Amino acid sequence: KGRPKSASLSRYTMINAPSMPKVGVLLVEEGEPGGPFGGKSIGEICTAPVAPAIANAVNASLGTMMTELPFTPERILAALSARRETNAR
C-alpha cells in the first residue's frame, strides 16, 4: 500500500469507474465576510485573457491598433479610415 504499481508511465493504466474508491462529500457552510452576500469563489474560469486575445485578433486582421474597448462598428470604421489616411501619405 502506498507504493506505485507501475515503474513506468507507459504501463500505467488510468482508473476507471468500477475501480474508483467510494468518495464522501462533506459540505462546510461558512460565509466570506469580504464576498458579496457572504459568497465565496468556487474556481470560476478565468476570463481575463479573452478580451485582449480578441482585440489582438481584430487588430492583426485589420492592420490597426485599437486600444479602447468596446470595439464598436464606429470605432472599427474610424480605425480603418485612419489606417487608410496613414498609408496614403
Image (cartoon, helix red, strand yellow):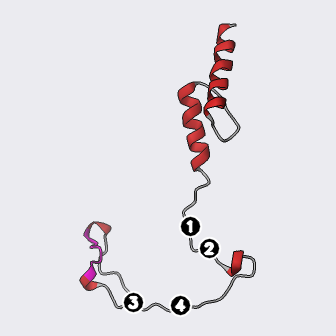
Residue 18 rendering spot, x and y as whole percentages = 24, 84
Cβ atoms under marks 2 and 1 closer than 8 Å:
yes
Q: Amino acid at mark 3?
A: Val
Sequence-first tag of 4 and 2: 4
Which corner quadrant holds the N terminus? bottom left
Expressed as whole percent of the image width and height from the top left, the position of residue 34 reads: 75, 77
The image position of residue 31, as x and y in percent, is: 68, 85
**Amino acid tagged 2:** Ser
Please say whether residue 16 is one of the residues in the magenta stretch: yes
- Magenta residues span 11-17
Earlier in the chain: of badge 2 and badge 3, it is: 3
Q: Earlier in the sequence, mark 3 or mark 1?
A: 3
Do the CB atoms of the residues marked 4 and 2 lie less than 8 Å apart? Answer: no
Secondary structure mostly seen in magenta is loop
For the residue pair 20 and 51, the one nearer the viewer reads as 51
Of the numbered discs 1 and 4, the one sitting upstream in the chain is 4
Q: Position of residue 25 (x, y in %)?
A: 46, 90
- Badge nearest the viewer, 3 or 1: 1
Whether residue 36 sits left or right of residue 77 in the image: it is: right
| Relative to 82, residue 12 above or below | below
Going by the numbered disc 4, the residue's amino acid type is Leu
Eyeballing the image, is 65 above or below 23? above
Q: Which mark is residue 55?
A: none
Q: Which residue is mark 2?
A: 41
Task: Please name the residue that numbered disc 4 is placed on.
Answer: 27
